[in-house]
Amino acid sequence: MGTVNTQLDDEARSIFTRLGYTVSGDGAEFTAERGWKAVRVTTMAEPDDPPESGCLRCFVTRRSEAREIRRRLVRTDPDYDWAIISVANDDYEVVRAPPGPEASA
């Protein structure tokens, strides 16, 4: 299973790098920064309990696991903005993104 996790970790780093983020850190958790935004990225090959704290978080998982991770996050309602990216083959999709800044009138 270590190879699967390493592959998912590499895919997550690649996605954020292609999106213009500077990526730092090793393993299943790393930081992706662009401009003012620093996102704590956690890869999850299998659903796990979400972290209790954070600011901006993104969970990267296989497409088959995304629904369960979303369910756990909705159920626990953590006190941070979160997103989920699901990965399948050489493609990814944003399953859920945090709300954007509100437009001022």
Image: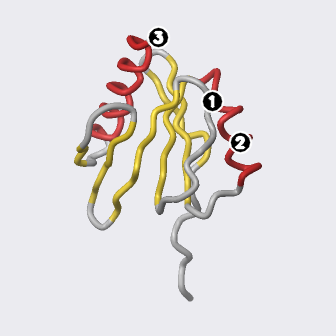
First in residue order: circle 2 vs circle 1:
1
Q: Which mark is residue 99?
A: none
Residue 89, position as x, y percentages in the image: 47, 15
Q: Secondary structure at mark 3?
A: loop
Q: Which residue is mark 1?
A: 47
**What amino acid is at disc 2?**
Arg
Asked whether disc 2 touches disc 1, contact meaning CB atoms under 8 Å apart, the reply is yes
Give above or below for 22 relative to 100.
above
**What amino acid is at disc 1?**
Pro
Give above or below for 34 relative to 95.
below
CA–CA distance in space, label 2 to label 3: 22 Å
Residue situated in front as seen by the camera: 25 or 87:
25
Residue 91, position as x, y percentages in the image: 46, 23
Q: Which residue is mark 2?
A: 72
Q: Quadrant of residue 98?
A: bottom right
CA–CA distance in space, label 2 to label 1: 8 Å
* Classed neighbour count for the residue bearing mark 2: other residues with Cα under 10 Å, few (<14), some (14–19), many (≥20): some
* The residue positioned farthest toward the bottom in the image shown: 105
Give above or below for 5 relative to 70.
above
Asked whether disc 2 touches disc 3, contact meaning CB atoms under 8 Å apart, the reply is no
First in residue order: circle 1 vs circle 3:
3
Q: Which residue is mark 3?
A: 1
Residue 88, position as x, y percentages in the image: 51, 19
First in residue order: circle 2 vs circle 3:
3
